[in-house]
Amino acid sequence: MVKYLLHLFALAGLYLASVNLVTADETESYSRLSGLENFQVNNENMMSSGQPNQQQFEALQAIGVTKVIDLIPSDRSEESALLAKLGLTYHNIPVVWENPRIEDFEHYVALMQQPDGNDGITLTHCKLNWRGAVFTYLYRVTQLNESEAIAKKDLLAVWQPDEIWQKFINDVKAKYWTAPLE
C-alpha cells in the first residue's frame, strides 16, 4: 500500500511538473522518498514518516520541509547535527512508547505553533511513523479542526493503535477536542 501511495506521489509530481506547478527537482525529490517508511503528506504544511536517512532528509528539504519534530527517545545528537548542517530547524520530544503523555502532546502543539521564521512544511517522524501518525492525527483534529474522518483514515493507513495508544488518543481528545455537531 505504501509503495502504491509513493508511486502515486511520484506520478502526481510528474503531472504537476508537466503543468509547471512543481519543478523537476521537486519531482525528483519525491521519487527519492520511495523507501521512506510510512511516509504521508498530512496537509500542505505537515508530513509524517518513519526515520529518514540523510538522502531522504535532503529530498524532504528540497520539497519544502523546514522544521523536523523527532519523537524518538534516545540520543538524537547525530540527527540534530545533520539537520543543522542542512539548515533545518530540529526539535526532539522523547515520547516513551509504553507511556505517551498529554505533556508530550502539549510540547508538540507548542512546537507546531512556534513561529520560527520558516513558512515551510513540518515533518513529524519517529522510527516507523506510529507515534508520528498519532501526533499528527491529534494535532489535525484538535488544533486545525480538520475532518476527523480524513485524519483518522490517514492514521489507520499507518497502523491500528494498541490499547496504550488508544487511551492516549482518547485522553488528548477529551482534553482538547470538541467533536463537530453532525
Image (cartoon, rainbow, N blue to C red):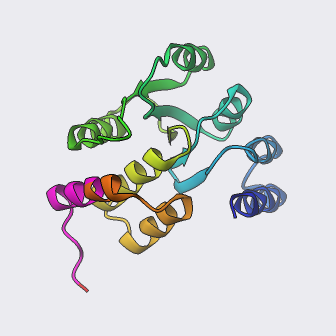
Confirm whether the magenta stretch covers residue 174.
Answer: yes
Question: Residue 140: x and y, percent?
Answer: 37, 57
The magenta segment: 168-181
Q: Magenta-highlighted stretch: main secondary structure?
A: helix
In the figure, residue 61 lies in which quadrant? Answer: top right
Q: Is residue 15 above or below residue 23?
A: below
Residue at 69% across / 35% down in the picture?
Answer: 62
Residue at 76% across / 48% down in the picture?
Answer: 34
Q: Nearer the viewer, residue 164 or 179?
A: 164
Quadrant of image for the N terminus: bottom right
Q: Is residue 105 above or below residue 44?
A: above
Question: Residue 80: x and y, percent?
Answer: 51, 17
Confirm whether the magenta stretch covers residue 47.
Answer: no
Report the side of 17 relative to 97 (left or right). right
Q: Is residue 152 above or below residue 34?
A: below
Q: Give the farthest residue toward the bottom.
A: 182
Residue at 23% across / 72% down in the picture?
Answer: 179
Q: Give the farthest residue toward the left.
A: 175
Question: Residue 180: x and y, percent?
Answer: 24, 76
Q: Is residue 98 above or below residue 143?
A: above
Report the side of 79 relative to 13 (left or right). left
Residue at 44% across / 22% down in the picture?
Answer: 74
Q: How many marks?
A: 0
Report the side of 23 relative to 79 (left or right). right
Quadrant of image for the C terminus: bottom left
